[in-house]
Amino acid sequence: MPNQQISRSAYRIIMLVLLALLFLAVNMFSNVMFRTARIDLTENGLYTVSGGTKEVAASIDEPITLRFFYSEKLANDFSRIRIYAGHVRDMLEEMRARSGGKIRLEVIDPEPFSEEEDLAMSLGLKGAPTQSGDIIYFGLVGTNSVDGLESIPFFTDEREQYLEYDIARMVQNLSRPERPVLGIVTNLPLDTGTGGLMSAMRGDSQPFMIYEELRDRFELEFLEQQFEAVPSRVDVLLIAHPKPLDPRTLYAIDQFVMRGGHVLAFVDPHSEVSLTAGPNGEPVRGYTEMSDLGPLLESWGVRYDPTKIVGDRAIAQRVRTGMDARRQESDYVIWLAVPRANVAADDIVTSDVVRLNLGTVGHLTPAEGATTKFSPIVFSSEDAKLYDVDYVKTGPRPDDLLRDFKPSGERYTIAARISGPVKSAFDAQPEATAFDEDGRPMQRKSGEKAGPHIAATQGDANIIVFADSDIFDDRFWVRTDSYLGERIAQPIADNAVFIMSAIDNLMGSNELISLRARDKIDRPFTVVEELRRSAERRFLAEQEALEKRVAEAERKLTELQIGGAQGQEAGPSEAEAAAIDRFRAELLESRKKLREVQRDLRRDVETLGANLRFVNIALVPLLLAVLAAGAGVLRYRRRKARVERGA
């Protein structure tokens, strides 16, 4: 009998050891075999990469190295960074898994005073100092095989919604060893700046600051405003307040879009920059006040009226008038200071825009029956109206514009993103309209010829249209100073941010452009927040009632004390004593009610928290246990039924 007892004990111990070994083996096997397997149970798929990102990762030709610098040990005390870092790492792992081995990922913990920290600093990463004096690094550096380098200096909370886009854009930029080509069609003096061509010939021209940023980032190719075809090497076409374009040039742009080219177009009903950028503040030679793209806008699904200018009282710029010594500034309703609230919150292009300074803008509307999607990304407030451009040309004073201002109550779209299939605005290439002395068509200024006619885009077009060109003018968005012969720019608005973001976005593939802002990882407890707000409203109401009662009691008490002091030198009278007692009783009662409100708030929140803990900790396991028990009973009954049938 003892031997049998010992054998049973040994059997149990052996079974426990075997179960422990099996548990470890299953864990090790799952870590190896299912390392990249993931199930995203979040409501909005926060951890699931989009189809566009998968396409970007799968299309990489040359190897790319991503170095993720994360001060893991130092960040343990900062839960927000720790959670965000886990999201970043998961996204990077997913990109690596989708790249077919083309992405090499290195995770580096740059400890203080280490070689890794020196490397992070040399690569331009920015650290966040802690109270202890240590530096937390939380950034990403990407390199390719031809010494290309892209970086995200620090993953900030403000860009969390655009994490997938930022990483996908970095990977795509690194997968293209050569600088992208930006084609430019414009009548603005971008490369000469104020003073125009005459200043350039004298050698004292200063290009617009935006032009210098474009030149630093892209390879620029200026196209004359008469050409047969947009060169095939152009990735994005920037059209900025062009001269009136003839049909063959419009056709060339149309076919560029049909071939899948991306366009950023700025049209203007009344260009301020053209009127003042010439010598001595005069108009630029050959300037045009108005620009339009005629049939192209219609084919893209956009309606634009070049005879109307948007005035907005709510977001008007303050300008110096110099007419009244008592009032030096006034609201100029046709010059707009567009705030963050008036740009699309979910579009990549406007994600970093806080303010845009614009002058005499037009407005856009979607065309009826269009095949494209019209998405406003910059718009006016509802305190706006339309002015006739002929009236604006007369030079009305700011007060004149304000005096009879009657808002329409309508928001006007100033800039819009156009996406979707587009049909050509032409049935075929238009006939030549200019001929030489021998009756032959005049030689066009572009070397490339038009190809076979394309009637419609095969995929979705990607176009951004902006009804203003003064966004380029330095005086609207930047202050420049000279230091040791160099121009130092101090931006006062985000005009350059918008233009650069729009071009960067359009330089990407259609898959990358389709990415939008995602929800943040943090999900607020909306029910708890509503309970808190409700209790706070009650609390504030009680507090207001208390203050009124206290003020009234103090007023009456003061009156009694003044009357008592005038009538007698003794202590408080019976009336004063009664008032004091009543005041104290009211005060105690009010404080008691306030405590009850606070207790109710805490009790409601704690009850909700307990219910949530029960659901997460107990209810789900109980449901699984019930299901398992039910399955066991069902299997037992089936087995028993089979035995009985066999008998």
Image (cartoon, helix red, strand yellow):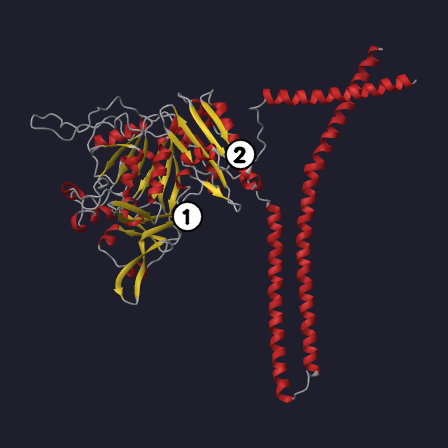
Q: How many marks?
A: 2
List the single residue furthest toward the bottom: 567
Up the image or down, 561 lies above or below 132; here it is below
Between residues 553 and 302, which one lies in front from this camera angle?
A: 553
Per the image, label 2 sits on a secondary structure element best described as helix
Label 1: which residue? 340
Residue indicated by mark 2 = 87
Residue 161 position within the rendered picture, expressed as x and y whole percent measured from the top left: 48, 38
The percent coordinates of residue 461 (x first, y second) are 36, 30
Quarter of the image for residue 73 reads: top right
Residue type highlighted by circle 2: His
Horizontal side of 295 relative to 43 (left or right) equals: left
Local packing at callout 1 (Cα closer than 10 Å; few below 14, some 14-19, many 20+) is some
Residue farthest along the front direction in this orientation:
113
Above or below 535: residue 104: above
Q: Who is closer to the viewer here, 154 or 209?
A: 154
Element assignment for label 1: helix
Q: Alpha-carbon neighbours of circle 2 within 10 Å: few (<14), some, or many (≥20)?
A: some
